[in-house]
Amino acid sequence: MDTSPYEALAEAAADGVDFDGLRAERQGGQLSVETPEATLTAPAETPRSALAEISKYVENWFFWHQTAPQAAARWAFLRWLEAADANGVPERYDALEDGVTCSWGQLHLTVSLDADGQRRYDLRHEADAGVAVADLERYEDPRDARDIAKLDADGEYRPLKAAPTLRGGWVFQDLDAASLVSTVDFFYPATMENWHRECEGDLDISHWHETMARQTGIYGVIETWDRQAGHEHVEWVAEACCDDSQCLKRREWGYDAETPLETDGGSGIFPCREPCSVVVSAARQWTKQEGEEARTYEFELTPSEKEQLETIVDAVADGQVEDIRPADVRNEANQLRVRFLRAKLFDDDGDLGGVPTENK
Amino acid sequence: MPALVIAAHGSHLNPDSSTPTFEHADRIRGTGAFEAVREAFWKEEPHFREVLRTLDSDTVYVVPLFVSEGYFTEEVIPRELRLEGWSPDLWESDGTSATHATCTANDTGQTVHYCGPVGTHHAMSDVIVRRAESVTGDPDVGAGVGLAVVGHGTERNENSAKAIEYHADRIRERGRFDEVKALFMDEDPEVDDVTDFFDSEDIVVVPLFIADGYHTQEDIPEDMGLTEDYRTGWETPAEVDGKRIWYSGAVGTEPLMADVILERAAEAGAAVGDALDQVREQTGGAALIEQ
C-alpha cells in the first residue's frame, strides 16, 4: 500500500479518530494526537517525525483500517487472535514481538511482527506447535488448505471439515491477514462468521425439528421420526454424531427453540448452528430403522460373551478397532477373539445363535 | 464488487466429487472478475446454507453446477440459500431455458442473482464436442462418427431428459457428426444398447454428468459392455458388438466448463470484463466459439 500510515491518519483525523487508545483530530494544518502515554501535535502535511514516539499506535490504527480485511467477522476474528480488546497497544506490540498464539479447531495460529513491524501469521496443526518449520511441508496459497483438509492421516476422506481428524505435517508461514482468514475459511468454512454472529448475540440457530421439517425428497421421511413422544431420539443422534470425538463444532441447536438437549454439545470454540448434512443423511437411515417394532429374541450367551459383545460395540463406536494389536488376544474386540465368537455363535446363514431375524 | 458462488452437489463418500468444482472455481478466481469466488455444496462445506455469510459482497451470483432444471436447482438450492420469494416461475423456463432470477437472501440481506444450471446453457454443447475431441485425440472428429450424449434421465423429472436432448439436437443440427443420439441410464433409449442406435463404426459416448463417480466410472462402462468389471478398467476405444466405443469421462471435468459458469454469471448481469476471453484462452474455448 502506497499511503503512509501517518498521512492516512492525518487525512482520517479530519473526521476524528478514536481507536485502541489513539485519538486524533485535525484543525486546519495542525494534527492533535493523544494516547494514554502522550499528547502531541504535528503538522498535518508532514506528521511523521513528530509522531515517531507513538508509531505503534499509528501503525496499529493503519493496520486495522487499511490492511486487515474489513468484513466484520474476519476483522473481529483477527482482533480476537491477538486479544486486541484486552490489551493496550504497547502491551500488545510487546506480545506480538514474541508471537501470540491461539487455537481454532485443530489449527494453531500465531501472529507476530516481521522486521518492518508488520503483522505476519503462521498457521499449522496444533500437534505441530513446537515443530521446526524445516520439518514441515510449507504452503503459501490458502487454497492448498482444501487439499490438506480432504483426507486424514490414513488417507480416509473427511466429508466433515470439523471432524477432529485433520492431518498434520504442514505449515502456512508468513501469511498476511487476508490470506490467513482465507486459509482458515478453507479449513473450517463459515466458522468465523458463525462465531462472530454468536459473539454479537445473533447466531441464527436452526433446531432439529425445523431443520428436519424443511427436508424434502429422500430426506422428507425424517420428519416422521418426530411424531413419537419425547425427543430421546434426538439425544441419541447428538450423542452419536456431535460429540467432540466426531466434530469440533459446539452444538448449539436443540430439539426445538424451547427444548434444549441434555447431551453435551461439546467444547469447541466455534458453534454449530444446525444439524449438518451428515446428521441429516444418518437421520434418514435411523428414521427407517427406528420405524421397526422391537421383538423378543432368545439367545444363549456366557457372561463373558455378553460382555465381549458390549466391548465390541464400544470399540467400534469409539474408533478403537484400528488400535487393537493383531495378537492382543486379551482384548475382547481383538479380531481373533471376534472371529472365534462368530465361529461359535453364528450359523451358516450368519444368524446369531442360529436364531433367524425374521420368523420363518 | 460482486462475488460468485459455484453451487455443486459434493459427496459424503467420494473425495473426488468436488475436484472439478474447485478447478473451475480456481480458473475463474484467476481472472479477478469477482471480489471472491466460493465453492458451496449440498454434501460438503461450506454448505449452501452457510456460504453466503462467508462473502462480504452485497451482490452474489450463484451458478448451479448441475445438469438440469429440477429438484436441486429449483427446490433445494434456493431453499437452502434462503432466497426470499423464490419460485421456479421466476425463471420463466420451458425446462431448459432458465437464465437467472434475482432474490434477496433473508439471512444476510444480500442480493442474489440465481442462475440457471450450467447443464442447460447453450455453451455446454461446445463442451460436449470438446470432450469428443479430447477422448478421440482428433480436433476434427465428426465425419464417419456417431455421438451419444448420455444423461441420467429420470421419470420423476422430465427436465432431466430435456437437457440431454437439447444438446443432442443442437449438435446434430451442426452436421458435424454423422449421427447424434440422446441416451439415458434410467429411461429409454437406454445406454445399455448403445450400439443398436448407431450405424457408424465409431461411437463417441459423452456422459452429461458434472463429476466422475459411481455412474460414469462404474455403471455406464459396465452397462455398455466396455468391461465386465469397472475395477479392471477398459480400453479407449473399446470394441463392443463390432463397433468402437470412445467413452469420455464426465463432461463436467472439462476445463472449458469454467467458460459456461462465467457465461451464466455474465448473462445474469455480472460485469466479467475480459474474464471470458482469459478463460477461453486457457481452456482453448475461443476456437470452439468461433466455429
Image (spheres, grey):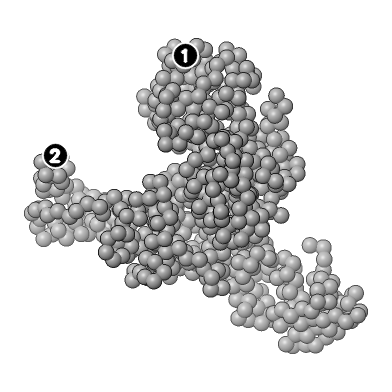
Disc 2, SS: loop
Quarter occupied by residue A18: bottom right
Chain bearing tag 1 is: B
The chain holding disc 2 is A
Name the residue located 65 percent from the left edge and 78 percent from the top edge. Answer: A92
Q: Name the residue at 60% across, 56% down.
A: B104
Q: Is residue A252 above or below residue A283?
A: below
Residue B93: percent from left, percent from top: 58, 38
Q: Residue at x 39, y 71 (%)?
A: A258
- Between B59 and B191, the residue placed more toward the observer is B59
Mark number, residue A348:
2
Q: Which mark is residue B254?
A: none
- How many C-alpha atoms fall within 10 Å of the one at disc 1: few (<14), some, or many (≥20)? some
Horizontally, residue B228 falls left or right of residue A82, namely left
**Please, what is the three-letter code of the amino acid marked with disc 2?**
Asp
Q: State left or right for residue B252 relative to residue A358.
A: right
Up-down: is B67 above or below B104? above
At a point 71% along the width and 31% down the height, the residue shown is B286
Say which of B50 and B164 sits in front. Answer: B164
- The residue that disc 1 covers is B243
Contact? badges 1 and 2 (CB < 8 Å): no
Residue B110 appears at what percent x and percent y?
Answer: 63, 58
Task: Describe the element under mark 1 as helix, strand or loop.
Answer: strand
Q: Amino acid at mark 1?
A: Lys
Expressed as whole percent of the image width and height from the top left, the position of residue A264 reads: 36, 70
